[in-house]
Amino acid sequence: MALLLPFGSLSIQLPRLQALSELTQADPSSAYNHINCVQSAQGFFNNVRTPATLLVIPALNSLWVDLASTTHRSKHPVAQTLYTMSVMLTVLCELVCVFVATVAGTRLMAGGFDPMSSDAVTLLVREFELPYLATHLAFVSGLASFMFAIGLRAWIQFGDLHGKMGRVLTLMVAVTLANIVAYFHASINRFHFGLPGLLVRFLVLYLKAFGLLGVLSAVSIVWILVLSYQTITEQLRDHGTPTGHLSVEQLPSLKPLTATEKAAKGDARRGSTHESNAGSTPRRAEIKRS
């Protein structure tokens, strides 16, 4: 786009979202540098499938954890809802990553495409752009969701009982998560808009590949977000804010016992033991006579 100015013209180049395959087309003059990249492409799917599988294991173990059973304080329903949803999202995203990587690896072994390319990424973008983007997004989304669950668990576990420790652990997770997202955004140098451009490109490829099923899936995701928002707002309306619900007044008393309280507690324990032994003596006599 050119702007006419009194002293001349100013040309402005507007950014344009382009397909990944358009940006990675090799120069025909460098065709002699092309090699068979099938093995390297298979290595990519194998490498991303292994950590995704390992991440599913702790996520499954944490999926149905009741937060009230692991902390000294009562939990807020919103905290439980967010924790369960984030862990469920981790499991689903990582399973999708494993599935897509396995299917794409099988397609690579089947052939039927040009295996010659300058590098493995160019081959994947040219021949398997949708599986390549789906694997990336599923793995990173699952990892980010799992880290969010870890930060939420740290806040619930130590938020009021050890306020500074809770803030330290939560801040550590938040900083790490922000750096992961920032690094992933910076590494997507094939789009003018980084991560948003990758999401748009993936959505376009997904709708083009699956048609009506893709539209129904997108509508279902929007409906899931709406229902989740309605659930959280209802819980906040019924139970108040998490800070008010998880107040220090509701925590058990952790002050040390005095000498008098310790003595009384010891006498009560010895009295209960004496009563249990006295109650068991007649029973032992009956067993001996029989």
Image (cartoon, rainbow, N blue to C red):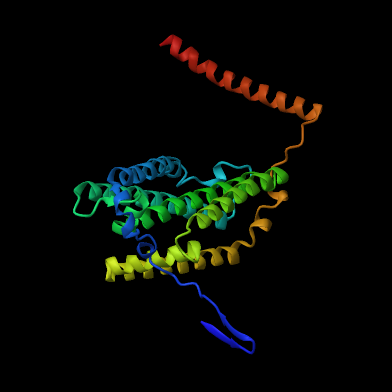
The residue positioned 49% from the left and 53% from the top of the image is 86
Left or right of 119? Residue 285 is: right
The residue positioned 36% from the left and 69% from the top of the image is 204
Residue 246, percent across and down? Answer: 66, 52
**Eyeballing the image, is 68 above or below 17?**
above
Residue 198, percent across and down? Answer: 44, 63
- In this orientation, does residue 130 appear? no
Question: In this view of the protein, which residue sits in the foreground, 122 or 180?
Answer: 122
Tell me the quadrant of the picture where the C terminus can be found.
Answer: top left
Question: In this view of the protein, which residue sits in the foreground, 91 or 253?
Answer: 91
**Eyeballing the image, is 40 above or below 178?**
above
Residue furthest right in the image: 259
Question: In this view of the protein, which residue sits in the foreground, 81 or 257?
Answer: 81
Left or right of 202? Residue 69 is: right
Left or right of 282? Residue 273 is: right
**Eyeballing the image, is 280 above or below 238?**
above
Residue furthest top in the image: 288
